[in-house]
Amino acid sequence: MARQCFSEHGVYPLGFSFPTTQVQPVPVTDRPHFLSTTYPGTPHSFTTWEDYLYEYRSSFFALSTKKGGWDTFRHLEILFSGTIPLMPGLARSSRFALAHYPKRALSDLLDSLVTEGPATPDQHTRDFFFQWAEEHLTTRAMASYVVDISEMSTERVVFLDRALASRTDYLSAFSFIGLTEVLGSSLVAAFEPSFLFDDFSGDTTRHYGKGFGYTKVIPSGLRSTDSLSLDSSRSELLELASSASTIVVGNYDANRDEVGGLLDAGIDPSRIVCILGSDFPPDRSMLRDIKRSGMTFFVREFAS
């Protein structure tokens, strides 16, 4: 699917992922609710992520609709609770949207509930979706896919996202977490997102989604000593980037000036891997520019 996407559009599909360290075995217990009472678009009053997930773990199904784009962290919170997300309209999405999900199985299951009436899923069905998520949708699995499909050199990888150091971008954050798991000390954050490390002492609830699920998940021992301060000069960033075998740009839209500066300074574009995490798919003009850039791009959303 990824290679077909690249053949047609010149980019690879990428989506949100679930921090591997947060995956917990799903207890085999009776679930009192057929459908979760937590609905998209309605505010919830949960103060802890554990209480929030418990609501999903008490249900067989949960509604999870398209927001700005098809990709949302809610899908993952549901799946990793051992619950099955119901996604109306999923069958009409681009075949490259949510490319890492078992989309046909999810669509067929929802269709059967509509046409044949409500029925609780058997254990085999529930196990299938949870095991699929464990295999394909963790941060480690998604980062391994990025490394493999891009054929990037992993000798020394610099992760560039100046904005992530001060505010959350889901796709960039999940990508950084996964690359840390896969590459270990070979990964250097140009600008450290300190709230992702387990020794962070600040208030995580100020981050997007109250910081549920992704803050304080990376062991502090994996912190790089080569990271720059936010007020570092462009020449310091260039020096760090020049030492890398690969540069991964966690949020291309927010770091275009930095990327342009690196290219103007002579950094080989083939060494740069860019992630586009916008809710909106790139238009034809941007896809043409991407193909001409010589850089490798991963995209989150695709037009239906």
Image: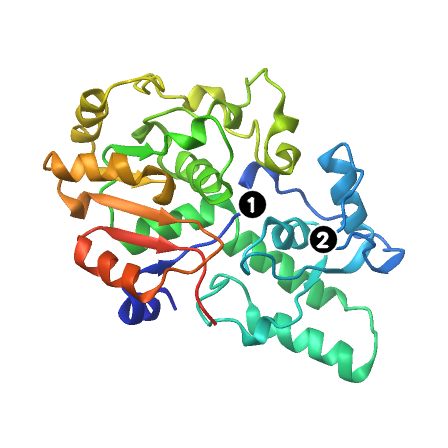
Mark 1 and mark 2 lie on one chain; the one further toward the N terminus is 1
Residue named by callout 1: 18
User: Label 2: how many residues lie within 10 Å, few (<14), some (14-19) or many (20+)?
Assistant: few
Mark 1 secondary-structure assignment: loop
Q: How far is mark 1 from mark 2, CA to CA?
A: 21 Å
Furthest-bottom residue in view? Answer: 115
Question: Which color scheme did the rendering employ for the protein?
Answer: rainbow
Picture coordinates of residue 111, whole percent (x, y):
70, 79
Picture coordinates of residue 134, whole percent (x, y):
56, 52
Q: Is residue 245 visible from the viewing direction of this image?
A: no
Q: Say above or below: 278 vs 193.
A: below
The residue located at (29%, 59%) in the rendering is 286
The amino acid type of the residue labelled 1 equals Phe
Q: Nearer the viewer, residue 282 or 99?
A: 282
Q: Nearer the viewer, residue 3 or 161?
A: 161
Q: Nearer the viewer, residue 134 or 71?
A: 71
The amino acid type of the residue labelled 2 equals Gly
Residue named by callout 2: 41
Total label count? 2
